[in-house]
Amino acid sequence: MTTLLALLLLSAVLSLIYFWMYIGKSRELRSLQMNVALINQRSAGINQLINEVFDYSKKNPNQDIERILESVGVTNKPAPAK
């Protein structure tokens, strides 16, 4: 009988440990998901800004703007013919 009680106690203790580990990992996951959402928002904002600068550079050509756009991999120049 005492062996069964010891196993029951061990099972209960392990269940509590696994429960707290699950809660901790759930909180960590939620925090990481919020960080990913924030990064995605910032990335979308930066892309929108780059697109606006690109459109502006089409209307008002400027060497300084061209250098900035080229540094981020965007160019207003047509691709070379093959």
Image (tube, rainbow, N blue to C red):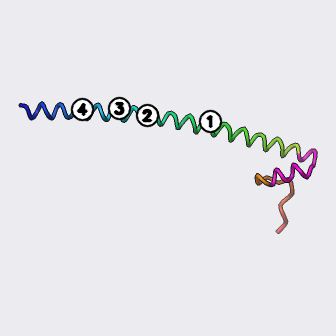
Instruction: Using the numbered discs, state the Cα–Cα distance from disc 1 to disc 2 in whole angstroms.
Output: 18 Å
Q: Mark 1 and 2 residues: CB-CB less than 8 Å, in contact?
A: no
Quadrant (top left/top right/bottom left/bottom right) for the N terminus: top left
Few, some or many residues within 10 Å of mark 4 (<14, 14–19, 20+)? few
Give the left or right position of residue 27, taking residue 48 as reference: left
Mark pair 2, 4: CA separation = 20 Å
- Can you identify the residue that label 4 sits on? 13
Q: Residues within 10 Å of mark 2 (few under 14, many from 20)?
A: few
Q: Secondary structure at mark 3?
A: helix
Label 3 or label 2, whichever comes before in sequence order: 3
**Position of the C terminus by quadrant:** bottom right
Residue at the spot 76% in from the left edge and 40% down from the top edge: 48
Question: Which residue in the protein does label 2 denote?
Answer: 26
Q: Are marks 3 and 4 in contact (CB under 8 Å)?
A: no
Q: Which residue matches tag 1?
A: 38
Foreground: 64 or 37? 64
* Mark 2, secondary structure of its residue: helix
Q: How far is the residue under mark 3 from the one under mark 4?
A: 11 Å
What range is drawn magenta here? 57-70
Q: CA distance from mark 3 to mark 2?
A: 10 Å
Q: Viewer-nearest of labels 1 and 3? A: 3
> Is tag 1's residue or tag 4's residue first in the polypeptide sequence?
4
- Going from N to C along the chain, the mark reached first, 1 or 3, is 3
Which mark is in front, 1 or 4? Answer: 4
Q: Which mark is drawn over residue 72?
A: none
Does 66 lie within the magenta span? yes
Judge depth for marks 3 and 2 and give the one in front.
Answer: 3
Q: Give the main secondary structure, helix, strand or loop, of the magenta stretch.
A: helix
* Mark 3 vs 4, N-terminal side: 4
Label 3: which residue? Answer: 20
**Which corner quadrant of the image does residue 49 belong to?**
top right
